[in-house]
């Protein structure tokens, strides 16, 4: 650009500058266009393909209507303009015209309603499901409970904080990656029962054509039947709080053998976790485990350094609760605090995770109480 400026400011130089800028813009536009998809996805389920087909039918009906209406309008304006001496016709109280412009739109709407109704009936038919999963929205994570298999876990965002704070290069799955994806079998009808623990969320997977609100105190239903294995991503589609954008959904679809192996693995892990609650944990082990739990569930509000967010979330570093009031500390982690954003984690974490995160908070950032909260302490408080 400096050479272009040095070449002068005449029409030729300006034309060269404009040509260069236009070529650069075209190159950027063509590069961006490769990543753009203006249409909705076809998806990987029968429902999503029906929705896509319905969408395209309605789209082309609208295109035809627009072409006809605007074509007639522009033709009429051009051929019946005043400069040609055309005298306008009068259609005042014309019964024929009124019948025409009433019947034609009615027929169009009926023609659109028939396939739309068939698709909607199919979307709302959750009967004969082979797998039932309860999905509960939390700020800002999802809980998946397999009602047939007694599998229960939370799914949290795992995008590194460095990427979020623009300190590292973002990946293709930025803000769309989780620690525990929802795993589903291919070729089986899966029913979702959706609710929320706090505010309104919305569970949305574009490739399934499933988007359903999760509302506190209500159970909404949806279903899917995936055609092929793969990883499918979505997000919470409801503005649910300050970290709304950090609430992704990842679904891994597996064939029957792989799904059965995953279920068996989850059952084994569940037994191992139950056994771990009975072992004697050292302070070092609890600190390592607690740091992982804290960074996943607590750092978004209280910050990784324990300093909190002034005016919104209290600091844990040097806090009297985290350094002195052990019983109060345990109580607030288990039961939350009414009227604040502090959630109750007693039903979200097992005894090991609860003991570990409380121990970590009481010994990190210079708190150094030297106190240990054991899984047995948590179980005793919870009456287990």
Image (cartoon, grey):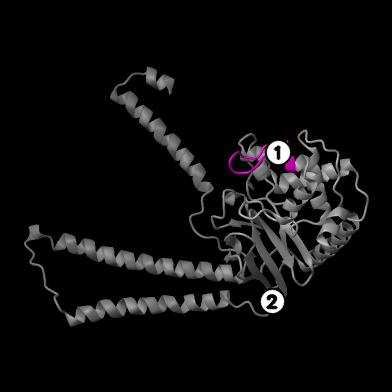
- Label 2 vs label 1: CA separation? 45 Å
Q: Which residue is mark 1?
A: 306
Closest to the observer: 281 or 314?
314
Magenta-drawn segment: 305-321
CB of mark 2 within 8 Å of CB of mark 1? Answer: no
Mark 2 or 1 closer to N-term?
Answer: 2
At which x and y percent is residue 265?
84, 61
Query: Within 10 angstroms of label 1, few (less than 14), some, or many (20 or more) residues?
Result: many
Mark nearer the viewer, 2 or 1: 1
Q: Main secondary structure of the magenta part?
A: loop
At which x and y percent is residue 41?
55, 60
Residue 368 tag number:
none
Tell me the element at label 1. loop
Residue 291: image quadrant is top right
Q: Which residue is mark 2?
A: 129
Magenta stretch encompasses residue 15? no
Closest to the observer: 343 or 223?
343
Res. 287 in view: yes
At which x and y percent is residue 330?
77, 50
Depicted 327 relative to depicted 363: above or below: below
Query: Within 10 angstroms of label 2, few (less than 14), some, or many (20 or more) residues?
Result: some
Closest to the observer: 62 or 93?
93
Q: Residue furthest top?
A: 6
Q: Residue furthest left?
A: 85
* Horizontal relation, residue 119 to residue 141: left or right: left
* Horizontal relation, residue 21 to residue 33: left or right: left
Residue 193: image quadrant is bottom right
Residue at the (27%, 63%) spot, across then down: 70
Magenta stretch encompasses residue 308? yes
At which x and y percent is residue 124?
57, 76
Q: Residue furthest right?
A: 280
């Amino acid at each position: 650009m400096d050479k272009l400026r040095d070449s002068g400011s005449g029409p030729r130089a300006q034309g060269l500058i404009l040509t260069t800028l236009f070529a650069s813009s075209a190159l950027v536009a063509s590069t961006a266009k490769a990543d753009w998809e203006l249409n909705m996805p076809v998806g990987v389920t029968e429902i999503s393909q029906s929705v896509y087909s319905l969408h395209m039918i309605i789209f082309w009906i609208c295109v035809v209507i627009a072409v006809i209406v605007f074509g007639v309008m522009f033709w009429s304006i051009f051929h019946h303009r005043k400069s040609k001496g055309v005298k306008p016709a009068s259609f005042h109280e014309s019964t024929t015209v009124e019948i025409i412009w009433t019947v034609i739109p009615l027929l169009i709407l009926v023609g659109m309603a028939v396939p739309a109704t068939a698709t909607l009936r199919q979307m709302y038919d959750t009967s004969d499901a082979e797998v039932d999963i309860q999905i509960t929205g939390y700020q800002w994570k999802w809980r998946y409970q397999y009602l047939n298999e007694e599998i229960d876990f939370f799914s949290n965002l795992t995008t590194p904080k460095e990427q979020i704070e623009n300190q590292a290069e973002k990946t293709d799955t930025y803000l769309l990656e989780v620690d525990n994806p929802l795993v589903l079998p291919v070729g089986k009808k899966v029913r979702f029962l959706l609710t929320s623990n706090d505010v309104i969320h919305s569970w949305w997977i574009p490739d399934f054509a499933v988007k359903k609100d999760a509302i506190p105190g209500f159970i909404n239903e949806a279903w899917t039947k995936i055609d092929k294995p793969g990883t499918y991503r979505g997000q919470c589609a409801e503005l649910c709080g300050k970290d709304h954008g950090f609430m992704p959904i990842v679904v891994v679809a597996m064939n029957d053998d792989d799904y059965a192996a995953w279920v068996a693995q989850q059952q084994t892990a569940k037994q191992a976790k139950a056994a771990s609650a009975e072992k004697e944990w050292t302070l070092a082990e609890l600190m390592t485990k607690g740091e992982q739990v804290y960074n996943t569930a607590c750092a978004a509000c209280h910050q990784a350094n324990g300093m909190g967010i002034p005016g919104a979330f209290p600091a844990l570093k040097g806090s009297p609760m985290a350094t002195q009031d052990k019983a109060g500390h345990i109580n607030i982690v288990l039961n939350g605090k009414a009227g604040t954003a502090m959630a109750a984690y007693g039903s979200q974490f097992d005894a090991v995770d609860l003991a570990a995160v409380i121990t970590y908070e009481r010994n990190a950032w210079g708190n150094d109480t030297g106190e240990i909260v054991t899984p047995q302490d948590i179980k005793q408080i919870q009456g287990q």
